[in-house]
């Protein structure tokens, strides 16, 4: 999960308490957080290995915005709807590799965000292979056929 009930209370305080009084289900907050997590994973799962090593603060904020939107079982306010749409828009850009989550390594403060989840099966044209038995060094020692 990218956010907790405590995160929602810290961000939305009194508004969350009012929403909870109107909701018939006692697990509504947990359900909304789970829905937000699944929605986020649906967008970033093709680009990042899940679960993420740690949760960036921008992803936690977006999870709170999405969960808050889900808690509005009636008409959400314009601000709530806009924040939800902004979060989804950003997640779509992440999925398209046009934006980054800024995931940091647990061991260091180094950003590991740009590591692709899938390595290409072939090298791009014009690149030199630098490994294995048949690297350039070995091939240069072989006699050439003319």
Image: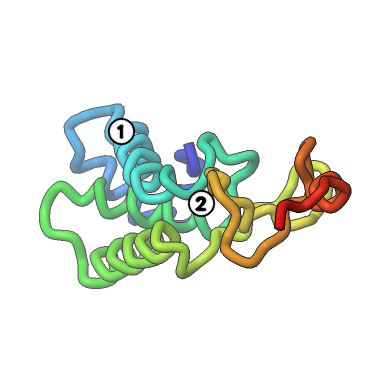
Q: Position of residue 141 (x, y in %)?
A: 88, 48
Looking at the image, which residue is at 38% across and 54% down?
A: 14
Q: Position of residue 38 (x, y in %)?
A: 35, 39
In 3D space, how far apart are the residues under numbered discs 1 and 2 (Cα atoms)?
Answer: 16 Å
Q: Quadrant of residue 22?
A: top left
Q: Mark 2: give few (<14), some (14-19) or many (20+) Cα within 10 Å.
A: some
Task: Name the side, left or right, on which 128 lies relative to 57.
Answer: right
Looking at marks 1 and 2 on the same chain, the residue that comes earlier in the sequence is marked by: 1
Determine whether the residue tagged by mark 2 lies in a helix, strand or loop: helix
Number of numbered labels in the structure image: 2
Res. 31 mark: 1
Res. 60 mark: 2
Q: Nearer the viewer, residue 85 or 120?
A: 120
Q: Position of residue 5 (x, y in %)?
A: 45, 39
Disc 1 + disc 2, Cβ < 8 Å: no
Looking at the image, which residue is at 34% across and 44% down?
A: 42
């Amino acid at each position: 999960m990218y956010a907790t009930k405590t995160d929602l209370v810290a961000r939305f305080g009194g508004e969350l308490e009012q929403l909870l009084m109107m909701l018939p289900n006692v697990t509504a907050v947990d359900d909304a957080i789970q829905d937000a997590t699944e929605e986020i994973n649906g967008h970033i799962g093709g680009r990042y290995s899940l679960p993420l090593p740690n949760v960036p603060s921008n992803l936690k904020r977006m999870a709170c915005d999405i969960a808050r939107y889900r808690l509005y079982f009636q008409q959400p306010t314009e601000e709530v709807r806009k924040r939800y749409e902004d979060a989804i828009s950003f997640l779509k850009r992440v999925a398209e590799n046009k934006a980054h989550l800024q995931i940091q390594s647990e061991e260091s403060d180094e950003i590991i965000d740009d590591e692709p989840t899938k390595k290409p099966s072939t090298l791009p044209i014009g690149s030199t292979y630098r490994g294995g038995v048949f690297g350039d060094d070995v091939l240069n020692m072989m006699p050439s056929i003319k």
